[in-house]
Amino acid sequence: MLTILGFAMIATFLVLIMTKKMSPIAALVLIPALFCVAVGKGAHLGDYVIDGVSSLAPTAAMLMFAIVYFGVMIDVGLFDPVVRGILRFCKADPMRVVVGTAVLAAIVSLDGDGSTTFMITVSAMYPLYKRLGMSLVVMTGVAAMANGVMNTVPWGGPTARAATALKLDAADIFVPMIPALLVGLLGVFGLAYVLGLRERRRIGALRLPDPSDEESVETKEAVLVGAGAGAGGGRLEKRPVGGTDGVDGDGNGGDDDGDLLKGLDPDRPTLRPRLYWFNALLTGTLITAMILELLPIPVLFLLGAALALSVNYPRLPDQKARIAAHADNVLNVSGMVFAAAVFTGVLQGTGMVDSMAGWLVDTVPAGLGPHMALVTGVLSLPLTYFMSNDGFYFGVLPVLAEAGAAHGVTPLEMARASLVGQPLHMSSPLVPAVYVLVGMARVEFGDHTRFVVKWAALTCLLILAAGILFGTI
């Protein structure tokens, strides 16, 4: 009976959030509460929730202060030189533009928020793609895959969810996976290079009209990123590969959309250019300390956020304004974690997980039992695409982990394997951030999906193979 009720609870939860009948936070709280009563253990609901909250509090704190920290770093302009450097690297060459898109998306993804990553990446790169007549689905596909790989950082969501669901330390999941994830990221860069060469062959090589003139790099970038197709100073020369005949490039994909996206505002009042190297050193130190596990990750981000706010914005009103600017993200993410305490607490406390795992162990062929991590890695592709991360990590992963434990597979191996599907997940129709990406890029979601699915799945399998090769899965 517990097995049936457990699967019914998970199915109800998935259906409600996939059909958007309830928000994930509401579903995580109300559905398990109702099923806890149905099981006959409603009197123990409070104990289950308190136990869950106690175990999840460090994860919620980590997410809260990581979002504030990286939000402040974007506000103060830490990533602005990266954007300018990538635009300088591109030099109106389609191959470099695509590679630059992947690099920019990967770097900005360190903030752990897909929407922020896509806003910055598209704002910087969209005008270049339009002015050069490049395929916009290449931009959206490469950005989504790079973000999917980087989304596995402990404060990005999936790793925190896996740690939450299995009551593990996020650093123990993430740090050993770094080599495999780097292989996946290199795979994305390699794919970007190939796609860029294809774009170069399709539309030819392009260059700025006079790279030796007296314009500053910033002025050239403003021409490309800010002015739009109609500005005379924004003209590009198109030269077919191997040829010398110049062709005016103004009409090649240019339109008035360039006026709408001006990249990162160089005059925004939150910038702190005099503190750039302090912020860069602080971020580098923070990431290094996290990898070396000098302190628990929540403590590191708590200290980092407090220091970043105090140094960059010494006035109290400015600090309050920066915190308020990122409050929505903080509330949504930390609220989700605490709501998950109800779901995981009921699932575990009522014995549903043990009952479902026992049934699953009986149905898994004996030969596959010792390879449950591999099975989980493969299943993470379709499951994280067709359901939200909340549904997979809180509803499915605990059951798979219990089944794996019966065959000697550790929860850490299962948690690492569950991260494999993230490059594909970031293009799922259930991910709100992907609508920010395709909306800003003026790309139809169906076109994006048709282009990216095969490449994202290949990236996932590359990470899985690397994880097995390195012995982390």
Image (cartoon, rainbow, N blue to C red):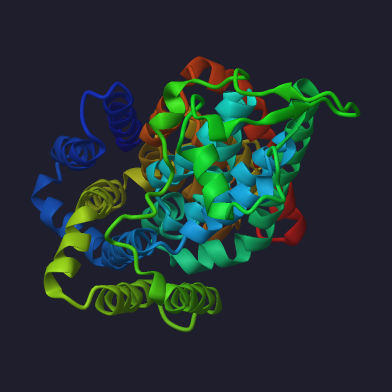
Q: Residue placed at 28% from the left, 27% from the top?
A: 12
Tell me which corner region of the image, top left, top right, bottom left or bottom right, holds residue 437: top left
The mark tally for this picture is: 0
Residue drawn at the location 57% of the way across and 55% of the way down: 216
Residue ranking furthest to the right: 242
Q: Position of residue 23 (x, y in %)?
A: 22, 34
Residue farthest to the left?
43
In the displayed structure, does residue 319 sit left or right of residue 229?
A: left
* Viewer can see residue 418: no
Residue lying farthest to the bottom in this orientation:
294
Is residue 300 shown above or below 14? Answer: below
Residue 233 sits above or below residue 219 on the image: above
* Quarter residue 206 falls in: top right
Which is more toward the observer, 116 or 82? Answer: 82
Viewer-proximal residue, 127 or 34? 127
Viewport quadrant of the N terminus? top left
Q: Residue at x 71, y 34 (%)?
A: 94
Task: Give the residue furthest to the front.
Answer: 214
Residue visible at 55% across and 79% down in the picture = 292
The x, y position of residue 338, in whole percent, is 22, 54
Residue 123 lies, in percent from the top left, at 45, 39
Task: Say whether residue 111 is left or right of residue 21.
Answer: right
Q: Is residue 293 visible?
A: yes
Front residue of this view, candidates 23 and 64: 64
Q: Quadrant of the C terminus?
A: bottom right
Q: Position of residue 405 (x, y in %)?
A: 53, 55
> 379 and 216: which one is in front?
216
